[in-house]
Amino acid sequence: MKSKRNSQKLRQNRQSARLRHWLARRRRIMTAHLLRGACYGIGTGSVGLVFWWVESNL
């Protein structure tokens, strides 16, 4: 019985390790997308402010 219980624990440990690795990979991808979106938003806002400033001062 002990070996069966140990094999179940090993299988659960492998599954949880795979799940942690999968989540870590997805977390990195999600972080990269959020950073890209923030950069696009900052750039768009900056360009909009420059055009607004140019139009209001002409």
Image (cartoon, rainbow, N blue to C red):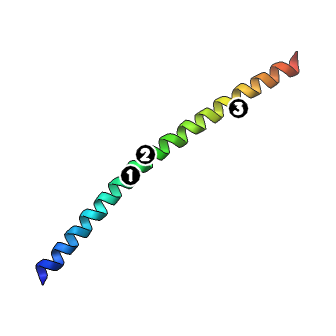
In whole angstroms, how far apart are the C-alphas of marks 1 and 2? Answer: 6 Å
The residue at 70%/32% (across/down) is 45
Residue 48: percent from left, percent from top = 74, 27
Toward the bottom, the furthest residue is: 1
Rendering quarter of residue 7:
bottom left
Left or right placement of residue 27 versus residue 53 in this view: left
Q: Quadrant of the N terminus?
A: bottom left
Residue 40: percent from left, percent from top = 61, 33
Does residue 8 sit above or below 16 in this rendering?
below
User: Residue 54: which disc?
Assistant: none
User: What crowding class fits label 1: few (fewer than 14 Cα within 10 Å), some (14-19), or many (20 or more)?
Assistant: few
The residue at 18%/79% (across/down) is 5
Q: Quadrant of the C terminus?
A: top right
The residue at 54%/36% (across/down) is 36
For disc 2, the marked residue is: 28
User: What crowding class fits label 2: few (fewer than 14 Cα within 10 Å), some (14-19), or many (20 or more)?
Assistant: few
Type of residue at label 3? Gly
The first of marks 3 and 2 along the sequence is 2
In whole angstroms, how far apart are the C-alphas of marks 1 and 3? Answer: 31 Å
For disc 3, the marked residue is: 45
Does residue 1 sit above or below 56 in this rendering?
below
Looking at the rendered structure, the secondary structure element under dot 3 is helix
Type of residue at label 2? Arg
Looking at the rendered structure, the secondary structure element under dot 1 is helix
For disc 1, the marked residue is: 24
Left or right placement of residue 3 versus residue 29 in this view: left
The first of marks 1 and 3 along the sequence is 1
> Circles 1 and 2: CB distance less than 8 Å?
yes
Residue 49: percent from left, percent from top = 76, 27
